Image (cartoon, rainbow, N blue to C red):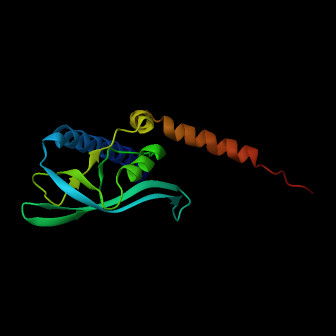
Amino acid sequence: MILKLFSVLIPMFLIATGFLQTFIYLKLKKTFNNWPNVTARITYSRFLNQLDVDGRKMVEAIIAFEYTFRGKSYRSETPVLRGYDLFPDFDYEKNLTKKYQVGDLVNARVHPKVNSVAYLEVAPLSRLSTVLVPLMIFLSIGFIVALKLGYISEVYEYLRLQFELATYQPDRI
């Protein structure tokens, strides 16, 4: 019973998270050009291209900038407003570090309600992520439907039997 409950809740959580991230990105992107514009100074710019602790490739432009808004100074390390990006674009990230060099004065957009949040630009949605995220949502919904119809337990049992047959070792005398 608990396994079936988790089998339904986990895909539903993933679906909700994907929709929420995309919704927030699209809402902010829509209003981005209306945010106050300030002059920012780039204080750090580096292209990160390495493996993380788990051996996954990390590709990211790390850019920090400082700006003053309504008499207060702020520092930001989020140069780009990004959507959900399952597969980062290597060329886009590398071009960001070429575009924003240390010491450059550039325009930044400040969130009107949260002044400590500012971005230099809006990143385009990743084409691969745009295709794969709806596909994963579709597969998750299909998994939930298959679970409700009882097909998942039948498939699990079939695979278990196939594995037992494949690894069967007759007793030798």
**Residue 10 rendering spot, x and y as whole percentages:** 38, 49
Looking at the image, is 61 positioned above or below residue 11? below
Residue 40 visible, this orientation: yes
Q: Residue at x 77, y 49 (%)?
A: 168
| Left or right side of 5 for 23 | left
Of 9 and 26, nearer the camera is 26
**Residue 54 rendering spot, x and y as whole percentages:** 54, 62
Residue 141 visible, this orientation: no
Image quadrant for the C terminus?
bottom right
**Picture quadrant of residue 19:** top left
**Picture quadrant of residue 24:** top left
**Residue 13 rendering spot, x and y as whole percentages:** 33, 47
Of 159 and 39, nearer the camera is 39
**Residue 21 rendering spot, x and y as whole percentages:** 29, 45
Of 157 and 143, nearer the camera is 143
| Left or right side of 29 for 15 | right
Q: Which residue is drawn at 34% across and 42% down?
A: 15
Looking at the image, is 128 positioned above or below residue 13? above
| Left or right side of 39 for 102 | right
| Left or right side of 101 for 67 | left
Of 70 and 80, nearer the camera is 70
Q: How many marks on residues?
A: 0
Extreme-left residue of the structure? 70
Q: Which residue is drawn at 51% across and 41% down?
A: 153
